[in-house]
Every structure is written in structure tokens, then in C-alpha cells.
Amino acid sequence: MLQEDFDRLQSLMASRAGYRLTRDRIHLAEHRLGPVARREGFDSVDALLAALWAKPVASLGWAVIESLLNAETWFRRDRAPFDTFARELLPAIGQVRPEGRVRVWSAGCSTGQEAWSIAIGALEAHANIDIVATDLSQRAIDRARLGAYTGFEIQRGLTAATMLRWFTPAEDQWAVRPELSQVVRFARANLLDEPTDEARFDVIFCRHVLQDMDPVRRGGVIEALERRLVDDGCLFLGPDERLDGDTVAFRPVSGRKGLFVKAPAALSRAA
Amino acid sequence: MDLRTCLIVDDSRIIRKVARRILENLNFEIDEAADGAEALTYCASVMPDVILLDWNMPVMDGLTFLRRLREQPDGKTPKVLFCTIETAPERIAEALSAGAHDYVMKPFDGEILQSKLMEVGAV
């Protein structure tokens, strides 16, 4: 891939997805675009990019963008946040909500493992839960909604007992049981877009997403997450992700890495 | 970090080698057995912290080994992870109810093994 092509990919990713495509990903980009080129009927990645620059077609542009996003995820990734959510937040929030209904947003859910992990924790705690899970990638959302995972994917983070309880064999894969899929709604959404509804959430999971974002876009996304949270609402980032300097709207919860509470009433919930 | 011990029980030398490499990276001290009878003899002298256990093996299969192990004094202390090509839910449930802490379907990789060991509290 020409350096010039990579430069243009960088600015495409930054402007449309807020994604920071770092220089060290040039070979990864080439590798990821190969299948996109084949799928879209081009002889090579170079031909695909030449066509894209010559006449930007929305669908082709998004196919390229989706392939370059960081889609890595697995069940119960980092483990602790899911236990904190199910054991501490869920009972506390459920107590003060009508019918105990807790609303959760998995923002940047990729192929769905995070949303299912949240759902499993909630249903095993017999909680009343409503999960919305969104991702920029339509392909990721399609896979998430299908809820079928390979032997490698299903075993990464789930015990066999949990797998048997919530999934059922479907050909060579393991598919979510209907009782689980009932509590999760998947939709494609861009974190850069202005909200088109007034939905508010008690807890937002936006983990390992901000770390890949363009610094210029990060602040706006954090602000949008804050607007989507109820007062005292909780935000989970990745355990090593921080909000220092980005905003005063959130306060970290001590002893719970990656957990933030929407200010100003932050300290009361943290205890 | 203290070294924990793991006994790998599998009749395939290749699987034992692959598993050994993964587990050594997770700071386990490894021993190997090629079937359930060999493993039972090993456990009679020293009980490992973790046992990675194949199902189908000559001489004594994994499930028979597990049941015999659990009858022994101290036989309930090792964390046992089945590691086999059996993927039928009934077989998995059978292994779990016989006292396995978790169950790994082959093929597996380091990330799977690590996450399973974390879930059972062995790392």
C-alpha cells in the first residue's frame, strides 16, 4: 500500500469514525482490506482504494471503515467489571427503579460478547434488565444479533457451565438461547452522530473504545455518553482507560478500575 | 509469584507438548501422564494444584480417573479441567457433574486456557 493511500485512510477513519488509525497499522490495514477488495469485486487492495478515492461511494467507504476498526472482544473481558455490575450496581439501581428495571447501553459492542456477558450476569441475578448494544460496524452488529459463536469464541471468557446454561449447539457453533436474546437489542450507531432520541441509561459500558479514538473527537464522544446517562449513572471504561483532563463530568470510583460515576453526586454511590 | 503445579493427562504427546508450553507461560510447573491409571498413580504420591484431563485414553479414560480421584483423600483439592474433543452438551454436563471444575473443547489456545484457569481461580 502506498503511503499516500494510508494517509487518506487515516483521515477517512478520523473524520467518519473518529478512529485513530496509527502508523503501525499499515500492514494490518493491507491485510484487512484484502477480503473487502475480493468481496467488492476488485483485483487488489490498490484497485479498491483507487476506486474509492476516484468516486466515493458510501457503501464502499463504510465497508473499508468497518474492516479497519478494532473489533477485538471476548466474553467477560477483564472479568471484574461484570462482577461489579451484577453484584453491586444492579441490586442498588434496581431498588430505586420502577419494577426494578435497569437500562444498560453497550456502546461499541463489536460482535456482541460484552452485551451477552452483561445479560448473563443480570439474568443469573434475576434482575429486570434492558440492554441496548450498538456498534459502528454493520457486519459486527449482524453477527452480534445472530448470537452464534465458534468454539474458540465461546470458550474465551465463559466457563463450560455458563456456556451450557445460556447457549445451545447450532451446527459448528454455539447460539444464544432465546431467553438471553430477549433482553438485548442491537443497532448500528455511530458515536459521532447526534442522538436522535431521548433514551437515558443507568449504566453505560464503553470499554476499549475511547483508547482508539482520535483525540479531537474523544471529548465530544465523552460528552455524548454523559448526556445519555441519568444523574448518578455509571460508566465503565477499560480498566486502564482514564478520563483525566477530558472532562469534570465523571469521577472515578476508587477500588473499581475503569468505573466512573456521573458527577456531582458521584461520591454517594461510590461508597 | 509462587509456582503452581499442573498435571497434564493426555495420550497425545503433541497435545501434552502444546499444553505444557501454554501452562509454563502461565507460571505452572508441569508434569505429564499418558492415561488415567498413570495419573492416578502420580496423584497418590503428590497432588497437583491443577489437572488438565483428556477424556478418551487407553488403559483408563478421563472420566473414570476423575471419579476415582474424587474418592481419594485430598482428591477433591485439585482443580480439574477436562480438555477433549467431545463437544456434545450431555457429555460436558456429565463431566461437570462428575466433579470437573471446567471443560475445554479442543481445539483450544492459550487465551482460552488462561481465561478458564482464571474463572476457576487457578491463576
Image: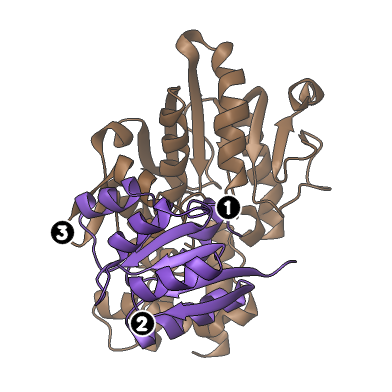
- Which subunit holds the residue at mark 2? A
Asked which secondary structure carries label 2, the reply is helix
The answer to whether marks 2 and 1 mark residues whose Cβ atoms lie closer than 8 Å is no
**How far apart, in angstroms, are the residues tagged by discs 2 and 3?**
28 Å
Q: Label 3 crowding class (10 Å Cα cut-off): few <14, some 14-19, many 20+?
A: few
Nearer-the-camera pick, A26 or B111: B111
- Which subunit holds the residue at mark 3? A
Q: Give the residue number, with chain letter if any, for mark 3.
A: A171
Q: In this view, does A168 lie to the left or right of A134?
A: left
**What is the x, y in percent for residue A210?**
64, 53
Amino acid marked by disc 3? Glu
Q: The purple chain is which one?
A: B
**How far apart, in angstroms, are the residues tagged by discs 1 and 3?**
31 Å
Q: Label 1 crowding class (10 Å Cα cut-off): few <14, some 14-19, many 20+?
A: few
**What is the x, y in percent for residue A239?**
68, 51
**What is the x, y in percent for residue A87?**
58, 29
The answer to whether marks 2 and 3 mark residues whose Cβ atoms lie closer than 8 Å is no
Chain A's colour? brown
- Which subunit holds the residue at mark 1? B
- Which label number is shown at residue B121? 1
Question: Residue at the location (76% across, 27% down)?
Answer: A270
Q: Against B80, is B110 above or below?
A: below
Q: Give the residue number, with chain letter if any, for mark 2.
A: A34
Asked which secondary structure carries label 1, the reply is loop
Asked which secondary structure carries label 3, the reply is loop
Q: Against B95, is B5 above or below?
A: below
Q: Is residue A176 left or right of residue A18?
A: left
Nearer-the-camera pick, B34 or A27: B34
